[in-house]
Image (spheres, grey):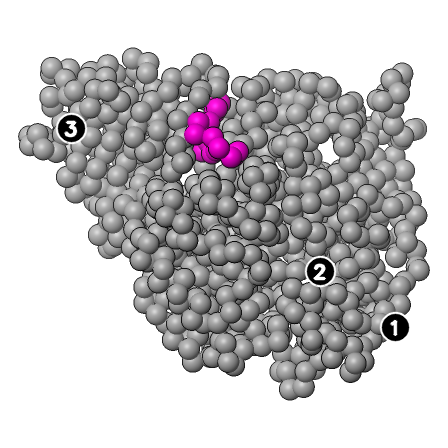
């Protein structure tokens, strides 16, 4: 349901439709009226104005902006306020619901929104280890789980700064501009809410297959030989590595689209990348949006000036700011010529160094100075040039602070930390984008607009599926970019907080997300890095990254960390078929890759409070150690049978915590009954994994009759489209059932030609929860007579069938039974 409230007499700022395409209010209304399955009902009162949204099936009120007739003091709120620079609207809330979402911030309280707290949305370059403050992204979206598990979602599509207060009995929006543009998503399950939400804001962009491998980065790889040493050291340590990254170290004087001629000689870098590609590995570079203005003959600047694509101050001049290269101009990514200019720069640099993806950072946008109008002198450049890399974030420009109603709006959002106003250390509020759009209105969209342009540029230049990683994000960013949670710290708290941050990103429609493994700022420890490598091995985006001036933390530095990494990443790489299939599902339905437990078990009230475990898909549960000195972990297991994916031992739960052994080199990963997991063999790169034989893990429950199902999607991993197409991809659905003494497993293939051409084979099947050893097994009606292909282990109730050599691209059927009994479906 779409509720759009605006000024009837004059136009107001709204999120541009070319950034976030969506139906008009009229089109939404017509679609709703024609829908045979309308789930929500709108009612309203004219005086005082208020509206309510109810679920038709149950009559339950989901949103009600009319103040209650006789409220308690803490439940009282104002009727709607609609002014030029201030909007306020509230809704009543029941006390027995659970709210999730609203971001981006780092939350010690965990996943659930905390009653009595204000959440501020204003894209800010603030270290992610600063808790409970506005960070890099802005998401005015929340999910409401009611008693019994029924779930709905609410989006206020507004890019202006805002505070959202979550009280015991109410939720209040206080917004400094724009319109009240509400979308209500009926659900009624968490996955259905995300499906409906991403259908509106954009399905997540499919990511290349290699991006699901492991990544290594550091701010401080001083030269190309450092990168070579790292890649070689991973190989010697037998630790998987798909992609090596460069932070700003590779640039000449921190200028975008340049290489330092001494430390990163172009020929050496190009040869290095050629070697990487020959080994099935990739190379990703960082770009910051600020374009240096302090150097002559800088072609990127010259072409930008020629196209006049830089942001303008209130006097119509190019807006001057300062970032790592010193004085810079910021591109206006809303400008109609920004696409072609940015694509030209990307193409020219790609022709020098054929990189595989781009990492766009500092795009809140971050500015080391504050002020509406700044200038610099030769003396200030000399001061800047003499600073070290770690201290050149001090402003050396001469700036004049603004005092307009946009610099100092009537309502002050709770923009805290080191910043005193919304224009502090970012683009000034009176700066103008294309067509006169004010930064005051478009601030939270800068990262999204850069992501869109960068995705288009990479698609055009490489003719492959693009990989973009952005720090700043907004509603709809997931359709264009991956995300990492920013500048965390090497602490156990940051390790623990990362779970909620990653789950939230998936809920916001950005499923390809990770945190800097082992911590970005500060020095990690051997134990912390080991545990973080274990957990980070199961982030959707898995990258070790740390800052200049910190100790090395590549996992091969310590043998104990190397061992943990080999074990955890070994399982990740075996799970690549599952992870890639989850990416396929995300691109089709928005389903997060990493999910909160309540996504699969919404009726289990206990799962709403689980903050440090997560699911990969619907059934693979990760239970990490998140505190020092622990060799056990207390993990919550929702109802059912769970199997450890390392040794297949099982836990049968009625919905309670279990204490699990977690030695220093071990993380607990379990699969829930009812799941069929496609797996391959572990290798040092994802490219090597792709050609290895498949194994199916079939997890049955303990009842006398049980079923399981699963999916597999395969393609070449780099085609721009990720869809089922004849000759380009293969999709397989698996179904299994068993009774006490018999069972069957079938594979049903759509578009099998791709898998056939690639020679992909299913070699092994592990059937978990099979209570009797079979004496009769057939594959496509051919009996397996050799006992060496059958192995039954009574302790974990596991039947393994090996040596199958079944082609993945064709339908198959496997049956087993004992003592002449055959399966009778119930």
Q: What is the span of residues highlighted in magenta in the rendered image?
A: 617-636
Residue 173 x %, y %:
80, 37
Element assignment for label 2: loop
Is disc 1 in contact with disc 3, using a CB cutoff of under 8 Å?
A: no
Is disc 3 in contact with disc 2, using a CB cutoff of under 8 Å?
A: no
Mark nearer the N terminus (3 vs 2): 2
Circle on res. 315: 1
Q: How far is mark 2 from mark 1, CA to CA?
A: 21 Å
Q: Quadrant of the N terminus?
A: top right
Kindly give the residue lying farthest to the bottom in the view shown. 297
Element assignment for label 3: strand
Residue wearing tag 3: 791
Q: Quadrant of residue 810?
A: top left
In the image, taking residue 23 as reference, residue 547 lies left or right, namely left
Residue beneath the point at 70% across and 51% down: 126
Q: Is residue 570 magenta?
A: no
Q: How far is mark 1 from mark 3, CA to CA?
A: 79 Å
| Tag nearer the camera, 2 or 1 | 2
Residue wearing tag 2: 365
Element assignment for label 1: loop
In the image, taking residue 465 as reference, residue 685 lies left or right, namely left
Residue 199 appears in the picture as rendered: no
Please say if 265 is above or below 823. below
Q: Residues within 10 Å of mark 2 (few under 14, many from 20)?
A: many
């Amino acid at each position: 349901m779409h509720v759009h409230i605006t000024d009837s007499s004059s136009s107001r700022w709204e999120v541009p439709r070319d950034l976030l395409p969506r139906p008009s209010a009229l089109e939404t209304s017509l679609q709703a009226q024609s829908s045979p399955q309308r789930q929500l009902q709108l009612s309203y009162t004219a005086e005082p104005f208020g509206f309510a949204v109810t679920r038709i099936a149950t009559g339950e009120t989901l949103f009600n902006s009319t103040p209650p007739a006789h409220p308690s003091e803490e439940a009282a709120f104002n009727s709607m306020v609609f002014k030029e620079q201030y909007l306020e609207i509230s809704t009543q809330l029941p006390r027995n619901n659970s709210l999730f979402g609203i971001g981006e911030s780092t939350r010690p309280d965990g996943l659930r929104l905390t009653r009595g707290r204000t959440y501020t949305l204003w894209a800010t370059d603030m270290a992610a280890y600063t808790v409970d403050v506005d960070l890099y992204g802005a998401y005015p979206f929340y999910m409401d789980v009611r008693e019994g598990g029924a779930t709905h979602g609410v989006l206020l599509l507004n890019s202006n700064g805002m505070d959202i207060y979550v009280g015991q009995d109410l939720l209040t929006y206080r917004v400094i501009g724009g319109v009240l543009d509400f979308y209500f998503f009926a659900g009624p399950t968490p996955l259905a809410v995300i499906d409906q939400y991403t259908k509106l804001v954009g399905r997540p962009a499919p990511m290349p297959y290699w991006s699901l491998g492991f990544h290594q980065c550091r701010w401080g790889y001083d030269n190309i030989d450092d990168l070579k040493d790292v890649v070689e050291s991973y190989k010697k340590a037998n630790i998987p590595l798909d992609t090596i990254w460069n932070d700003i170290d590779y640039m000449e004087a921190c200028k975008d689209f340049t290489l330092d001629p001494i430390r990163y000689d172009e020929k050496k870098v190009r040869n290095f990348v050629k070697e990487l590609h020959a080994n099935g590995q990739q190379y990703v570079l960082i770009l910051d949006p600020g374009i240096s203005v302090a150097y002559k003959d800088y072609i990127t600047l010259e072409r930008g000036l020629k196209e006049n694509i830089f942001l303008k101050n209130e006097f119509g001049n190019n807006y001057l700011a300062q970032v790592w290269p010193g004085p810079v101009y910021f591109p206006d990514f809303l400008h109609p010529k920004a696409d072609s200019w940015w694509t030209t720069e990307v193409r020219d640099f790609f022709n020098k160094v054929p990189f595989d993806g781009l990492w766009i950072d500092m795009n809140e946008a971050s500015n080391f100075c504050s002020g509406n109008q700044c200038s610099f002198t030769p003396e200030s450049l000399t001061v800047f040039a003499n600073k070290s890399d770690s201290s050149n974030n001090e402003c050396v420009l001469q700036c004049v602070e603004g005092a307009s109603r946009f610099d100092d709006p009537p309502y002050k959002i709770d923009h805290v930390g080191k910043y005193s106003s919304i224009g502090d250390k970012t683009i000034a509020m009176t700066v103008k984008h294309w067509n006169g759009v004010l930064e005051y209105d478009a601030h939270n969209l800068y990262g999204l607009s850069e992501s869109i342009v960068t995705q288009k540029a990479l698609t055009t230049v490489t003719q492959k599926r693009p990989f973009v990683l952005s720090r700043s994000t907004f509603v709809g960013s997931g359709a264009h970019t991956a995300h990492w949670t920013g500048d965390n710290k090497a602490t156990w708290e940051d390790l623990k907080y990362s779970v909620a941050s990653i789950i939230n990103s998936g809920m916001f429609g950005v499923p390809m997300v990770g945190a800097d493994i082992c911590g970005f700022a500060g020095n990690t420890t051997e134990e912390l890095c080991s545990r973080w490598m274990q957990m980070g091995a199961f982030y959707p985006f898995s990258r070790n990254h740390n800052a200049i001036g910190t100790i090395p933390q590549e996992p091969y530095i310590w043998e104990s960390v190397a061992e943990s990494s080999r074990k955890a990443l070994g399982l990740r790489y075996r799970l690549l078929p599952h992870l890639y299939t989850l990416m396929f599902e995300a691109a089709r339905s928005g389903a997060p890759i990493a999910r909160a437990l309540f996504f699969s078990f919404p009726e289990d009230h206990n799962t709403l409070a689980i903050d440090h475990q997560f699911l990969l898909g619907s059934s693979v549960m990760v239970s990490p150690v998140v505190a020092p000195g622990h060799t056990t972990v207390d993990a919550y297991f929702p109802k059912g049978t769970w199997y450890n994916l390392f040794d297949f031992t099982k836990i049968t739960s009625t919905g309670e915590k279990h204490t699990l052994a977690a030695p220093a080199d071990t993380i607990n990963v379990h699969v829930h009954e009812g799941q069929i997991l496609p797996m391959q063999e572990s290798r040092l790169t994802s490219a090597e994994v792709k050609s290895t034989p498949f194994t199916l893990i079939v997890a049955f429950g303990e009842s006398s009759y049980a079923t399981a199902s699963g999916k597999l999607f395969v393609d070449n991993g780099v085609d721009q489209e990720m869809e089922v197409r004849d000759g380009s991809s293969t999709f397989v659905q698996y179904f299994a059932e068993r009774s006490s003494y018999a069972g069957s497993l079938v594979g049903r293939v759509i578009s099998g030609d791709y898998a056939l051409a690639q020679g992909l084979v299913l070699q092994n099947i592990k059937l978990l929860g099979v209570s009797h050893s079979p004496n009769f097994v057939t594959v496509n009606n051919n009996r397996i007579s050799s006992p060496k292909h059958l192995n039954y282990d009574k302790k974990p109730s596991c039947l393994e069938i090996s040596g199958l050599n079944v082609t993945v691209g064709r339908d198959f059927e496997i049956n087993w039974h004992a003592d002449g009994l055959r399966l009778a479906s119930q």
